[in-house]
Image (spheres, rainbow, N blue to C red):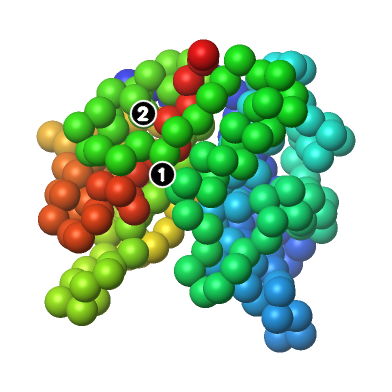
Amino acid sequence: MKKIWGLTKEYIKVERKENGIKTYGGDQNFFSSPEASTEDARKQGCGCGIVAFADLLLYLGSISGQYRIQENLSYVNRILSEEEYKQYYNSIYDFMGGIKGKVGISGLKIQRSFNRLARREKWSLRAKWALSGKKLYDRTEEMLMQDIPVICCIPMMLLKKDKNDYLPLYRLHQGDDLIPRLEKASYTRAHYVMITGINVIGEDTFYQVSSWGKQFYISRNEYDTFIGKHFLGTILGNILYVSKR
């Protein structure tokens, strides 16, 4: 495995209450419980976009004091407990206006939220939700070179004929010969992940991502094909492109 680009600092970690395992990024399943309120159930079911946005802000705050905000000032550069992460998540949830309906938040809403915050904090950063797949890889590479995590969406399926289509997520497995290999671990769609690195594994390029508090890999070729073949795939499935003004 050869890493092309990746974040310079250790990515966000949260200590799970149940077993003490450290996560790789936030996890909307922190809000899952038998006695969860209706709103908590909505956060668990549709909250991946807010997790990604919250983690982006938390990482930016860890690399520079100029990007620390009131909402995460006490949470940067340390391992959080589940309760601390939920408190932080809730502050970002309120800032973004919560989740309406059953499909989570749109990329355009993430864009607007980031730019509203950037204006409030007088950052020299601006965001836009990319609509074309042509520059997706180059922009992802550009952001990682600047130590900015990349919010990426695997699109929802709008057409009935596509209802069984999902994108594979891979985990890295080291075999008996100590050669790292990828194996399919899950499938997803209508889901936000955070790209934290780009790696060459075998003959393909893979995005290293954070999802549900775990590290996975997404094939660049499979992702490009997935967003390219589905209706509105490059609009619903794309990245939040953050750049300096």
Point 25% across, 28% down: residue: 135
Q: Of label 2 and label 1, which has the lower sequence position?
A: 2
Question: Residue 117's image quarter?
Answer: top right
| Image x and y of residue 165, in percent | 22, 69
Q: What residue lies at 18% left-to-right and 59% top-to-bottom?
A: 230
244 up-or-down from 136: above or below: above
Q: Would you name the residue on which mark 1 appears?
A: 152
- Badge 2 is on which residue? 140
Total marks placed: 2
For the N terminus, the quadrant is top left
- Can residue 192 be seen in the rendering of this structure? yes
Q: Are marks 2 and 1 in contact (CB under 8 Å)?
A: yes
Q: In the figure, residue 129 lies in which quadrant? A: top left
- Residue at the image position 60 percent from the left and 24 percent from the top: 9
* Residue 216 visible: no
Q: Under tag 1, what secondary structure? A: strand
- In terms of secondary structure, where does tag 2 sit? helix
Residue 173 position, x and y percent, is: 34, 49
Q: Label 2 amino acid?
A: Thr
**Residue visible at 21% across and 73% down in the picture:** 159
Q: Is residue 5 above or below residue 239?
A: above
Give the image location of residue 72, x and y in percent. Answer: 79, 37
Compared across the picture, whether 219 is left or right of 189 comes to: left
Disc number placed over residue 53 in the picture, else none: none
Task: Tell me the quarter of the picture where residue 77 sits.
Answer: top right
Residue 18, x across and y down, in percent: 73, 67
Task: Quote the CA–CA distance across marks 2 and 1.
Answer: 9 Å
Q: Amino acid at mark 1?
A: Cys
